[in-house]
Image (spheres, rainbow, N blue to C red):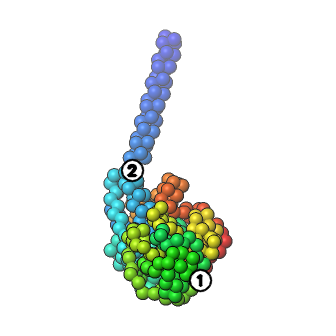
Amino acid sequence: MKKLTKIATIILASSALLVGCGKSNSSSSSSTKSSSSTQVSGKITIVGSTALQPLVEKAAENFQSDNSKVNITVQGGGSGTGLSQVQSGAVTVGNSDIFAEQQSGIKASKLVDHKVAVVGMAPVVNKEAGVKNVTMKQLREIFTGKITNWKQVGGKDQSIVLINRPEGSGTRATFEDAVMDGQTAKKSQEQDSNGTVQKMVAQTPGAVSYLAFSYIKSDIQPLSIDGVKPTDANVTNNKWKIWSYEHMYTKGKPNKVTKAFLNYMVSDKVQKSLVKDLGYISISNMNVAKNSAGKVSTK
């Protein structure tokens, strides 16, 4: 009888152990399932800088493929448009090449700045102009109209055709801050996107303008300034002066889905591959910092 009692006790203990294990596994499985199925959802509308547009478009495409319940619309229009529309609440995010403080009519204190990359910008010319390097003074005089022929700076005997960006363009503001020294550019034709400028410089004899590095292709000639080449390495230590942060502004703190996308923009997946692949510079690679007043300091 004692032997039977001992066997029964062992069986009951084993059963309790198995039941306990079953509950533990069930709980673990449920937790894993819940964690893997967590996905954000919602709509994000992004407008602004055409310099930043290619990066945000590609990142949005990748983000949506992993988050099927998110819909992201990305459009250009220029930094001024991005800032004014996010301020008015017309869009979720305003992309800008400049600080909100630099744009008239914008209350920067009402917006939240999310820096996602750095972009270098360079003067570019039609390849037939025969020029690869100018001094900063010569570049300024080209845009003020004092220099009108490429032969005046060692190039072909050909009239210079200026192509500028409109007021409100962050690329223009960045270029003028670094190059023009307070002087006003000569009136000329204006184009409202980096993509259009790139095509026009390539196709127009004697043309000169300026572009984000991400738009510089083999059919146009970027200009060095005072012997310094427009490269990522020269931007990171400020040897190349024409550069800006790429900002994504929200009106106040972003909602859950927008915050998730902004976090994705500064994740390793974007910063260590997409940023470089598309011609931008990761903020983490910068050895200097710039404030809204344009002052540059060593990190």
Q: What secondary structure is marked by label 1?
A: helix
Check the image and name the residue furthest to the front. Answer: 157
Q: In this view, does 272 lie above or below 298?
A: above
Residue at image location 40% in from the left, 72% down from the top? 204
Q: In this view, does 4 lie above or below 190?
A: above
Estimate how packed mark 2 is, as few (under 14), some (14 to 19) or many (20 or more) residues with alpha carbons within 10 Å: few
Indicate the position of residue 89 as horizontal and vertical percent values.
Answer: 35, 75
Q: In this view, does 59 lie above or below 201?
A: above
Q: In the rendered image, which quarter is residue 96 located in?
A: bottom left
Tags 2 and 1 in contact by the CB under 8 Å rule? no
Indicate the position of residue 228 as horizontal and vertical percent values.
Answer: 62, 70
Estimate how packed mark 1 is, as few (under 14), some (14 to 19) or many (20 or more) residues with alpha carbons within 10 Å: few
Query: Residue 137's mark?
Result: 1
Q: In this view, does 296 lie above or below 21?
A: below
Identify residue for label 2: 66
Residues 136 and 33: in front is 136
Tell me which amino acid carries mark 2. Asp
